[in-house]
Amino acid sequence: MLQRDTSKWSSSLEWAIGILGVFVAVWYLPGLTRLSIWTVLFLLVLAIVLEAIPVPIGKTEATLIFVIPLGLVAAYSSSAAICVLAAAELLTPFLVQKRRKWSTWLFNAGQYALSAYVMALVFHLVAGQSRVAADSLNWRVVVAVIVSGLTLMIVNHLFITTILRVRRNFVRSDLVALVTNDGLSLLASFPFVLFFIVAAGPLPVLAPVLMTPLAFIGQLFRLYRRMTVLRDIHTAVLKLTSEFDIDTICEQAASTAARVTYADAVSVYTLSEEKDVLMPSIIYPTTAIHDFNLEGIPKSAGGVIWSIVESGTWGYVPHTKHDVRVKDDGANGREYLSLAVFPMQTRGETQGAIVLYSLRPYAFGEYQEYLQVLSGQVAVLIENAKLYQQLQEQSWHDGATGLYNYRFLYEELERWIRDAEKTQKHLSLAVLDLDYFKKFNDTYGHLAGDAVLRSVGVLLSGMAGSDSIVARYGGEEFAVLMPVGPELANERVEAMRVAIARHVVDFQGYQLQGISVSAGIASYPDHAMDDRDLLLKADSAMYWGAKERGRNRVACYSPEFDAQLFVDQLTGLYTYHFVNIRLREEMEKGIQSWGALCIDVENFSFINSAFGFGVGDEILRRVSLILTECLRTNELACRFGGDEFLVLLPGVSAHELAAIALRLKRAVQSFRFEFANNVVISVRIRQKLDVVEDVGESGAVFELVGQMFATLNDHVVSELPSV
């Protein structure tokens, strides 16, 4: 009832002021007969154009219509000032298609007529009978223009404030914003008013025509503003075309929106994965963060932002206190009096919204086109970023276990090292290798092996904790990156080893158990100062500290492992462990095609038993020397184990690999292995070769190598070496 009475009183007051003002304008209408009808019509059209095309000035938009009543009252008459201003306010809403209540429409015209009437009284009071000379401007007229201009603005706002108070909608910041806006308009109008007054002295008929550029100036300002804003938006979007970080995209969008609209705060909201919460990705400026609810706006809470986002079209709330939809505007206590919401949509899917906030009411009426362009472009950028992140997530994960892969491990390890350098903190890397996994695969099959890898990966992820990263390092190897020193890392990894030893994997009704791991640990900065060295030393600790010392144990890096890391002590060839590391590094450089040559010395166990282990060792050393002499520097040769040798050649064809294999076989079998007592042994070798194309990780190469050696070992040779 109170609201209905308030609306009734405010409408009555609007009608009263409107009717009184129009009556005053009609009363002064006869005074227009002193001017030409064409002059009056021209001034009326100019006033309508100036009112319809506001000039953007900083955060506000000013109208130059004040030039008309101030110029007319000084150059012509009070009648011209009052009647032309009132008529312009009556006609402008129809021409620009602004919908208003009839009482409000009449009130605007009436209050302007009354304000112009008071302005005219003040002007004549200050100026007296003084008028403008043909070649000079009287200082009393200048003072009168300034004082009467201020009077026009003050009286105008007194009427508006009165109506707002009756409506119970008066907000002090509203008055400040309106006075600031009109103050800038008045300040911009004074030079044109003075020029109009000076021109009216010698050219009373042409003076109105000389004011025509005012309309063009306003339009030029608007076009310049439009071009500047669109250029800024285009520049910002262009910078982000190769950006795939959503936070960076949102931050640039927020800063651009704030810059072009002069918003006091901008929040870029993105939808949660469940699409039921608008989460503030970025709040600009950062000083406004405390003004907002960082937990987001749930869909269940409703509110104007969700309402506009679901509508799919932009929405503007000129005054938040006057809009019943404003339940949750995202703000956390601070009162923003106007907001504009621009949904970010692409291909019919909503990505979020750009929301502008202002401490002033009616702040964003002219920014629809600009922000629609920005929100549309940002929506496309966010969609592309999400697709890129999905692809990156897929490229960072191992398909068999679901864990991160070695690519992600390398990137994270490098980043962790950089952060540790800055924060002076410790980190540790553990490499865990499943013991006898090849025999496990041979016994139970590769599907069972994959099940074990997956199950162990889940176990490691659960035990590592949220502060650590677990990755499949390659083949049957896992890596765990932890933000702790060597002592605590050793405790964690030992607990993992014990848990794996007790772990049972259910596979197709069978319980697979007896799984064990060998683990090596290296820490920054205790053992290494960069990521590559840390990887090598964790690998070294795993191989030489755990594998070679009995397996199913955890070893922390020790300098004694370095001598055994790269070179096989018996043959002088690379170790299998080192070739594995080198192969990964070469693959990172883009080498995806490899030739594998597996070599096995025939009847080597017979040589050992017949001539002794010393002779057998010497044969292995001499075979290794022949391999080294026959290979180039970029071709990797290692002692694979026992009497087995492995040669890996990058980028060779099957024909080239066959030629190299033949050359090696002839070199070994033509060599005279002479020993004491004139003993000469003719050594023969068996070979298996293959070329793998487009290989993605070293594990695939070594899985093939394992199968090739298994084929060689299945071959039985009856012919003994000749002596």
Image (cartoon, rainbow, N blue to C red):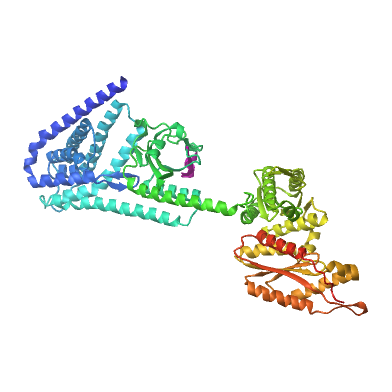
Q: Quadrant of residue 703?
A: bottom right
**Image quadrant containing the C terminus:** bottom right
Give the camera-side residue of 658 and 460.
658
The magenta segment: 276-289
Viewer can see residue 498? yes
Q: Return the residue found at the far right.
A: 677
Residue at (72%, 59%) from the top-left corner?
536
Q: Return the residue found at the far top.
A: 1
In the rendered image of this protein, does residue 702 appear above or below residue 32? below
Residue 685 in the image: state x and y as whole percent.
78, 72
Residue 692 in the figure: left or right of residue 118: right
Asked if residue 700 is among those painted magenta in the image, a careful observer would answer no
Give the camera-side residue of 126 and 236.
236
In the rendered image of this protein, does residue 89 appear above or below residue 14? below
Q: Quadrant of residue 661?
A: bottom right
Residue 640 in the image: state x and y as whole percent.
76, 64
Residue at (35%, 40%) from the top-left corner?
315
Residue at (11%, 45%) from the top-left corner?
41
In the rendered image of this protein, does residue 680 appear above or below residue 391? below
Residue 345 in the figure: left or right of residue 605: left
Q: Quadrant of residue 92?
A: top left
